[in-house]
Structures are given as C-alpha cells and as structure tokens.
Amino acid sequence: MTTRIRQAQRGLKNLANRAAPASGLKRPHACPGTDATRLTRDVSSMITWGGVALSVFVLIASPLAMGWAAADDASDSSSRVVVTLRESASITSSVVRVVDVAELHGGSEVLRKQIASLDLDDVPTNGKPVEITARCIQFRLRIAGIDPRLVSLRGTAVQVTASTKARQSRSKNRDEDSELDAKILLASFSKLRASTEQSADNDDSDKPDIEQAVINAAQKCLTKQLPWPEENVVIQLAQSLPRELSERTLSETTTYFAELRTAGVPLGRVTVRFVMKDFQTRTVDVPVQLDVRHYENVVVTKMAFDRGHQFSSADFAIGWRDVTNLSGYCTSPDQLVGQKVKRLFPESQIVRLVDVEAPTRSTNLMPVLVKRRDRVTAIARSGALSVTSTWEAQKDGRAGEVIKFKNIHSNKEVYGRVISATEVEATD
C-alpha cells in the first residue's frame, strides 16, 4: 500500500511541474511555496489518509462479511432435509418407501413428508434382500420434481428384506392386479369387437378394401381353372400384401385384375399377378401369394371304431371338411356300407377308401360311380407333390375298380382307380 502511495505522489509532482510553465508558474523545486507544490502536498495527504481509511474499512467490513456468509450458510443448512440411509431395513408393507430405509430431519415439515412418502421399489417375494442405493433415491427425487439442493443425502446403500406378511401381501396384490388386467383386456376386446361389428353393419359402401379386392380378383381368375363350384373354394392371403399395394386406396376410377402364375391346378400356395390401375396414380403390378383351399361334404365317423369293425349306415355323418391334400375320400355313405376298418379310427375322422377292406360280396352289386364318357379329375401323387388332370372314362367303373381313361389334353389312354364320382387315382 505504501509503495503505491509513493508512486502516486511522484506522478502528481511530475504533473504539476509540467503544468507550471503553461500557467506562468515556476517549478515546485524552485519555489516551495507555489500553488503547484501545495497542490501536490494536499493530494498526497489525501491519498495517504484515503489509504488509511480504506485499510480501516477493510478491517471493519471483513468480519461483518464473514458473519453474513456464515449466517447464509447456516440458513441454507437449516432449510435442507437431511436423509440418512440406514444400514438395513425390514419392510412389513408391500412397497418400499423412503421413510422405510432412511431417517429424515431438518427442512420444512411439508418437504419431509413429501420425501418420506416416495416409493422406491416393490417388496421382493422370493425372500432375498434387495439393495436400495443413494443414487436410486436421488433419481427418485428428480422424478418427483424435488430440487436436489434442498436435500442432503448421507449414506451409500441399504439392504432391504421383506417380512412374511409383506411377501404374502405383495403376492396377493400381484394376483389381484393380474386379474384386474385380464378383466380390463377382456372388456377392451369386447368393446373393440362390438365396435368393429357395428362398423361393418353400418358400412354402406360397396367398394372393397385392397385386401378384399385382391381376393375378389383371384376368385374370378381361379374359378375358370378349378373343376369345383365357387362356394367349394376358399381363398385367403398367404402373406402380407406388398407395401406399394397396401398403401394404395381404391377410388371410383380404380380398375384391377389378377392373372394366374402357378402351373397346374391352383391349389395350396398359389401366386397370382395383381394389377391395379388408376388415372390419378401410377399403375401397380405386383405378385401376390394366396392360399387356396378345397372344401367338400365328405363322410366322417360318428364315433371311434376298432380294427375289423364292419361299417353300417348308422356309423357315418356328413361333414364340411378341407380336402385340399386328400384323395380317395367318400361323399356318400353308400360307398362304405358293409366294408371293414383296416385300422383304429378316431371320432369325426374322414373315411377314405384306402382305410377300409373290400366287401366280401360281389363288386357287381356296388353302385356305378363313373359312367362311360364321364369326365373326372385324375390325381397323380409323388411324395408331397400332386398333379391333377382331366380324364374321360372309357367304361363304367365302381369304387376301387381300375378302369381305362383318356387324357383329354394328350389323348393318351391311361388307367386309374375309381375313388368317387368325380375323382380317380392314377395308377401308371
């Protein structure tokens, strides 16, 4: 401080010496009593006394400032809630809260109650302890929107164990929650189903959606290739529609059609080319995978039968079944009356000619299923592969008989075993 005062005094003297010639005065060292000399002395005195005053002010203000800071720190400390974690805790309720694992003091009562009621975890039902860490509590405080500056957290972790009563209460609550969730899910499903049915009933539009448009076009295309009535064929999508097709919508100017891409009889997995045109958007031409199923009214058993049982007309019923991958099924019980079962037969099982023995009576007494010049569907199988064709009978045939046919596509003579009035099995 003294050094700086001396430097200021020398600077003022130099300033006064430079200012003296301009004002007509002499230099201070030539005339000690001049105004410049007195000015320099007065300012020096002021600086000296100012420095002393400043030093006195600092000595007096410093303890006051330290006191005020200490008072502020004490105020902040008293406004904080101190949360001290216990070493371990045993819980009797079904939920672990802050008050169960820590002691709280300080701060406002409202804040202490808010922190104490915060839930941290569910009570473990397996009897093993669960660890609640200080970091977990800090995270929970932030979720609750509590300023972390208002909380002082002490401790690192606490081991929490559940009493038998708490575990039973937790298991009971979990069962009740599961039952409640199931009821809510069932109610939501029922509401959604009712809404869907009502929407379908109230739909006055005759325009099909994209999926239905594909099925309609495929139905029209495949009906020409299949020998069965349209009501005997069920067509469904085998996979999701391509994205460029599913994102389109139908309008009054939309036209569409399908073309068959699968060789042979279109049964099972079938690929069709679907084309959709619209004046407002570009044309979509994509392959679509379909699942084509063939259904028939066939003979099924009313009950289970042992091997060697001889069928009577009372043993059968007629059922609407999927026969896409079946051959030799019967459409009338008369084809099976009097024949014996070759194997164990379960209830409601489709009966085929290969499952029964030929009757002991003359085959001439059996009814004629295929008459001369009748056209039937011939099925040739090789492992999992089956090929169908249209044949023309060259003579009358009964069930199980092998007779001569003519392939109408190649005009070749072939032989097949009569299965039903509309189907034969290729023997070549």
Image (cartoon, rainbow, N blue to C red):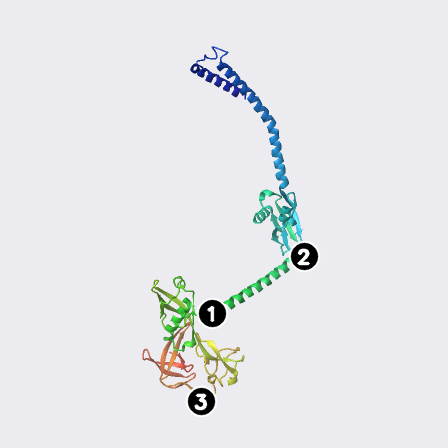
Q: Give coordinates of residue 166: x percent, y percent.
A: 66, 56
| Gap in angstroms between the C-alphas marked 1 and 2 | 52 Å
Residue that carries the numbered disc 2 in the rendered image: 165
Residue that carries the numbered disc 1 in the rendered image: 200
Q: Secondary structure at mark 1?
A: helix
Q: Earlier in the sequence, mark 1 or mark 3?
A: 1
Q: Earlier in the sequence, mark 1 or mark 2?
A: 2
Q: Give coordinates of residue 380: x percent, y percent.
A: 39, 76
Residue type (three-letter) at the residue carrying disc 1: Ala
In this view, 386 is above or below 163: below
Q: Earlier in the sequence, mark 3 or mark 2?
A: 2
Residue type (three-letter) at the residue carrying disc 2: Lys
The quadrant in which the N terminus is found is top right
| The residue positioned farthest toward the front in the image shown | 24
- For residue 312, say whether it is visible: no
Residue type (three-letter) at the residue carrying disc 3: Leu
| Gap in angstroms between the C-alphas marked 3 and 2 | 81 Å
| Gap in angstroms between the C-alphas marked 1 and 3 | 54 Å
Q: In front of the other: label 1 or label 3?
A: 1
Q: Secondary structure at mark 3?
A: helix
